[in-house]
Amino acid sequence: MAQEITAEQAQANLERKRKELGINPSTPSTSKRPSEIIERTIGSIVPGECWRHKKPEPCEDCEREEKEVQEQSERKKQEREQAVVAQREAEIKDRQDNPEKYLSQIGAGRRHLSCSFENYQGGEKIKAVCKEFLHTPFDLVLSGGAGSGKTHLAVAVLRELVRLCKILDGTDGWCKHDRKGCFVSVPELLAKIRATYSDPNGDEERLIDTYASVKYLVLDDLGAEKSTEWSISTLYLIIDRRYREMLPTIVTTNLTVDEIGQGLSRRIASRLASGKVITIKAPDYRMKRAAS
């Protein structure tokens, strides 16, 4: 069993090492040995007395310092909470004042960023039905000829959902998946899914799941795509899953529901018809502006 070394022996060993390294052993050390510090600390403690302030227990200074620490911690907590609230209020105001930025993030094109209910040139009854969607979402088909304002109305709905903070994007710290939105034309959607076949990192299932599970989805220009067995089955996968999960879908199309059933799929037409169908009988505003 190894013999215990006393503090004096340890000090002598240290002096010898200093000498071997060429350090002047006569130089006094300014640091105290641990045993000295412990002995002095223990020796300075008096039962019933605060060792920090040398006052009888309970020490008023200790209580005051502890209270100050607690108050400071509480103030910092409140400041953090207030900063979070202020940030959210600023985001809400920004959405109300600048919804175009957020519409762009969810897929709306520059041409339609200014579309709103206020500048829609159409019937009040049509706008009233679209506004119902804001509070009680449902599947909505906007059917009409080219340039009749279908896409305008769809984006106007998204604009109000953004302003009401019912649509959030991935950049928000408080964003939840069930508050996301997406605007995509049907030909573009199918092209993106088809592109996954030639991409080594492509994931068709993940992309379909994204469109099928997003909270609010606008499928623009249904019927403009080339109709194939693959395109029909792909669209059915997305629309059917959204139908089963009761996720609202807005569809714009030049076709009537009957034409969708005849030219695309009766199953797709049936699911879309379960919501509300608005037939817009209006002239082509684009052609009208070009002629004026």
Image (cartoon, rainbow, N blue to C red):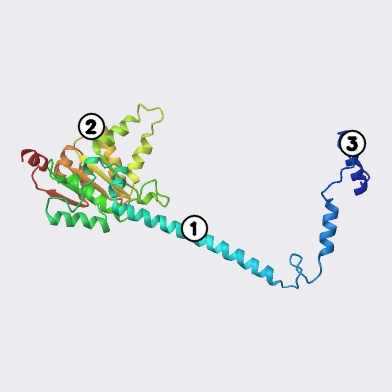
Residue 218: name its quadrant: top left
Report how far apart the C-alphas of labels 1 and 3 lie in the structure.
57 Å
Secondary structure at numbered mark 2: loop
Mark 1 — residue?
80
Indicate the quadrant containing the C terminus: top left, top right, bottom left or bottom right: top left
- Residue 256: give x, y in percent of width and height: 14, 44
Residue 19: numbered disc? 3
Report how far apart the C-alphas of labels 2 and 1 lie in the structure.
55 Å
For badge 3, the amino acid type reads Lys
**Neighbourhood count class around disc 1 (C-alpha, 10 Å): few under 14, some 14–19, many 20 upward:** few
> Which comes before the other along the chain, label 1 or label 3?
3
Secondary structure at numbered mark 1: helix
Whether pointer 2 and pointer 3 mark residues with C-beta atoms closer than 8 Å, the reply is no
Residue 257: name its quadrant: top left
> Which is nearer the eye, 166 or 73?
73
For badge 1, the amino acid type reads Arg
